Image (cartoon, rainbow, N blue to C red):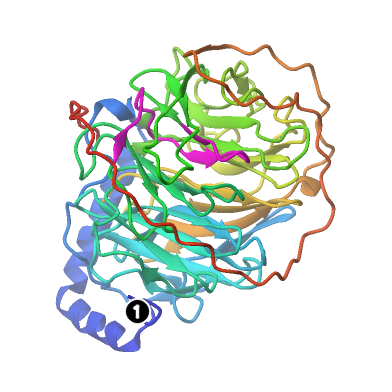
Amino acid sequence: MNVNMKRRRGDTANRRISFARSARFGAGRCCAAFLLLSTICASAQTLAPTWKPRLNKPLEKYDNPPSYIYRLESSPRMISPYGVFTSYQVNVDADGNNIVGDAANECSISVDPTNPSKMAIGWRQFNSVLSNFRQGGWGYTTDGGIHWTFPGVLEDNVFRSDPVTSSDETGTFFYLSLLQTFCENMYRSTNGGQSWTELQANGLAEGGDKQWFTIDKTGGPGHGFQYQSSDGINCSGGGVQFQRSTDGGVTWQAPIIIPNEPTDGTLDVDTNGNLFIGGEGFSPFYCVRSSNAQFGGQTPTFDQNTQIDMGGELSGGGINPAGLDGMLFLAIDHSGGPTNNNIYMLASVAPPGRSTTDVMFVRSTDGGLTFSTPHKINDDPVNPSKWHWFGTFSVAPNGRLDAVWYDTRNAVNNTDSQLFYSFSTDAGVTWSPNVAVSNQFTPFEGYPNQSKIGDYITMVSDETGGNVAYSATFNLNPNNGQHEEDVYYVRVFPSGQGPSPTPTPTASPSATPTPTPTPTPTATPTPSPTATVSPTPTATPTPRPTPTPRTIPTPRARPTPRPRP
């Protein structure tokens, strides 16, 4: 199904229908919205209690029917400069203006590696802050993020959440979306995100809550394979599950339970085709490896399981009352240099005895067999009142590491947040001085009848910088006097940050690995140079082969995790 023509947001006829509805319901609804949002904001400023993500009810649930747009107002799109960095609003209407009265959060970005000026961002789209009903929103740019087009949602009046997007090496984009059944389906775009094709009927990608996926971009036998994992709340039985697609996301093989159940994390593939999954189990973090998932004729097994100290635990609540304060992100170096196949993990975690979070980082130089001691990336003095949340990172093709996160260090109230940035050119041994790259915003306003600003933000790096998709509340809604949740794009880069960090000795590894056959060693890291020009390749994408999917036995039953909020 091609959804290029689904322009519900910018369609004049639909706006006239909305105007008719607003005539009947507008005044009372607006008053109710103001009271509701004022109450939510006031309660959130007191900071909700924190909670463990694995011990409560699902993060996603269907609890409101499809909503309508009751207001027709628009305002100029937000362009928010801060020093040498500029954030551009992504969720705009057909005329490029801000949509007053909606909300957008939980954004995932993809960049075309053959033409970095082409990008797409997926997000959770709330047509009205009066409702918690969300849909699969997306926007695309062809000029490097300065102007964005929001054609509509993937499917009108269909509940969607947890958007995850990614690109293969030819510039084909994919968009994985969670449905209200806790099943999923995958979309594909061959024109830079301007239109999307549904690859299977709703739910036939199976999966579950807080799913993530990655693509094998190596030249090995698993080239083009897609891998995904999801937590224990899913549509295909209990337990944290792994699934594989050998035909580019069209069909998905039966799920397999992942050892030690790492969840709220991500996946990546090294240059040898080995798959790694990182996440938090019921207490510690784990990095698990499958060396045979790349072979379509074999049932994937996990032959290495390493327990990891991240310096704390994932949490939810607090500054993000109904959501996570951060996920675990795993990414692998594909630079081809001395740091090639280093495995990196980063997360915003609550250190022991704290409820607020720091951005912590570890790395493995021996194929995931051992990991370094945790390193704190946010460089402000330890302050139990300050939050460093929604940490995420990516690895540039030249091996540079870029990290961003929300930070309250400059806030008198300890909750107003800014996007901060740091980078490393020596495999994460040292990190550059942190710099703010956005203005401050309050995370407690603009809630769409759901007290959170999503569960994550994302970024994709290239040789000279990083492309970031994040949510913020810069726009003021004049109807209720509060700011709105919107999606923004900002380009971060080391040259805007001062000198590179000075390397210091590498910390000793600290891990309790499970014995494993033949781990893949990597070289000891040395600083990787940063290129000074952006690539502008113009290679023509070529289709990849389509292997025949194979059946995998149904996994044994596992206990269902306790519900989460």
Residues shaded magenta:
255-277
> Any magenta on residue 270?
yes
**On the picture, is 497 further left or further right than 550?**
right
Q: Position of residue 437 (x, y in %)?
A: 66, 48
- Determine whether 385 is above or below 29 in the image: above
Q: Quadrant of residue 10?
A: bottom left
Say whether residue 473 is visible. no
**On the picture, is 128 further left or further right than 303?**
left
Q: Position of residue 290 (x, y in %)?
A: 46, 32
What's the residue at 77%, 43% (across, down)? 497
In this view, which residue lies farthest toward the front? 297
What's the residue at 42%, 71% (across, down)? 196
Q: Amino acid at mark 1?
A: Lys
- Neighbor class of circle 1 (other Cα within 10 Å; few <14, some 14-19, many 20+) is some
Main secondary-structure element of the magenta-colored stretch: loop
**On the picture, is 68 further left or further right than 495?**
left
Please state, as top left, top right, bottom left or bottom right, where the N terminus lies in the image. Answer: bottom left
